[in-house]
Amino acid sequence: MMMSAIVPHIPVAGVWTSPDGHISLELRADGRFIETRDDFADVFTGVYVLVGETLKLFEDRGAVVSGTLSNGRLSLGTVQRPAFHTGAEAPIL
């Protein structure tokens, strides 16, 4: 018998901007995210999951970023790229 757990995703909506104003990350209530840089729209897009204060961003091209969202403050760690990734894109916020 296989058991599975249902993870209670918390939908949020808002835009967080880097201190220098060059990068912004929009979390949408539908579970999608959009990152923009300076004048480049939709640089990175994907889905996010927020459980408690733990945030995971799953970029459409395979990268994964872990972070936290606590008291309105967004903190992200390093980008984990799949083994097949060979591109040289800029890291996600």
Image (spheres, helix red, strand yellow):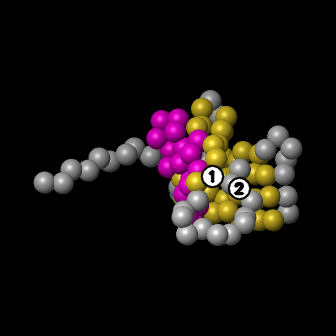
Q: Earlier in the sequence, mark 1 or mark 2?
A: 1
Locate residue 63, reporting x and y percent.
Answer: 58, 60
Q: Amino acid at mark 1?
A: Val
Q: CA distance from mark 1 to mark 2?
A: 6 Å
Whether 88 is among the magenta residues is no
Q: Is residue 14 visible?
A: yes
The secondary structure type at the circle numbered 1 is strand
Q: Amino acid at mark 2?
A: Pro
Residue at 59% from the left image edge and 50% from the top image edge: 65
Locate residue 21, reporting x and y percent.
Answer: 85, 47
Residue at 77% from the left image edge and 65% from the top image edge: 41
In the drawing, does residue 90 fall left or right of residue 12?
right
Q: Based on the displayed image, in which of its 4 quarters is residue 85 positioned? A: bottom right
* Chief secondary structure of the magenta portion: strand
The secondary structure type at the circle numbered 2 is loop
Q: Is residue 66 above or below residue 61?
A: above
Residue designated by label 2? 91
Name the foreground residue: 12 vs 78: 78
Residue designated by label 1? 79
Q: Which image quarter holds the N terminus?
A: bottom left
Which residue lies most toward the left here?
1
Which residue lies most toward the top here?
71
Please say if the residues under marks 1 and 2 sit with CB atoms less than 8 Å apart.
yes
Name the foreground residue: 90 vs 38: 90
Residue at 48% from the left image edge and 36% from the top image edge: 52
- Crowding near pointer 2: few (<14 within 10 Å), some, many (20+)? few
Whether 55 is among the magenta residues is yes
Q: Is residue 77 above or below residue 82?
A: above
Residue at 52% from the left image edge and 39% from the top image edge: 54
Q: Which residues are magenta?
A: 49-67
In the drawing, does residue 35 fall left or right of residue 62?
right
Q: Is residue 32 visible?
A: no
